[in-house]
Each structure stands twice: as C-alpha cells, then as structure tokens.
Image: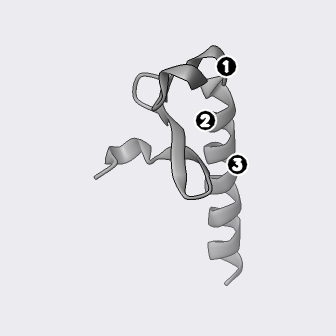
Amino acid sequence: SYGSFGQYTHEFDGDEQFYVDLGRKETVWWLPVLSQFSFDPQFALTNIAVGKHNLNFLIKRS
C-alpha cells in the first residue's frame, strides 16, 4: 500500500533506480553510486498534481 500520497518511481530497463518518498518529500536512491545525482522531489509532486488534475478533467468529461 502506498498510502494516501501515492507513489513516484524512476525505472530503467525494469530496474527501479530511485523513488520519491512523498510523505517526507525526499528522494531515496537504491544504489549508492546513483546518489551522486540529484532529483528534486518537488518535480514528482508537481507531476502527480498535474496527473490528478488531468484525471479529474477526463472523469468529468466521460
């Protein structure tokens, strides 16, 4: 269960590279070598908000 926040993950070739803990608003890297890169969790939160808005719009139109 992902809770009320949902989930945001980034995968490559079927392997999860990182996910954003939406409750704590931080990026969690699976491999230590990848932690040298940065990913702003706010980007994930923005994408989720846009997705929810678009979904609600489509639900109202159908």
Front tag of 2 and 1: 1
Q: Is residue 54 above or below residue 22?
A: below
Q: Please, what is the three-letter code of the amino acid marked with disc 1?
A: Ser
Which residue shows up at 49% across the image and 28% down it?
A: 29
Q: Is residue 28 above or below residue 7?
A: above
Nearest the eye: 29 or 57? 29
At numbered mark 3, what does the secondary structure look like: helix, strand or loop? helix
**What is the tally of numbered marks visible in this picture?**
3
Residue pictured at 34% horizontal, 48% vertical: 2
Q: CA distance from mark 2 to mark 1?
A: 15 Å
Q: Secondary structure at mark 2?
A: helix
Q: Residue furthest left?
A: 1
* Residue 54: image location, x then y, percent: 71, 60
Dot 1: element: loop
Q: Nearer the viewer, residue 3 or 8?
A: 8
* Image quarter of the C terminus: bottom right
Cα gap from disc 3 to disc 2, whole angstroms: 9 Å
Going from the N terminus, do you reach mark 2 or mark 1 first?
1
In the shown orientation, is residue 25 left or right of residue 52?
left
User: Which mark, by number, is residue 50?
Assistant: 3
Read off the residue under disc 1: 38
Residue at (69, 32) in percent of width and height: 43
Q: In the drawing, does residue 13 fall left or right of residue 3?
A: right
Q: Residue furthest front?
A: 33
Q: Which mark is residue 45?
A: 2
Q: In the figure, residue 56 lies in which quadrant? A: bottom right
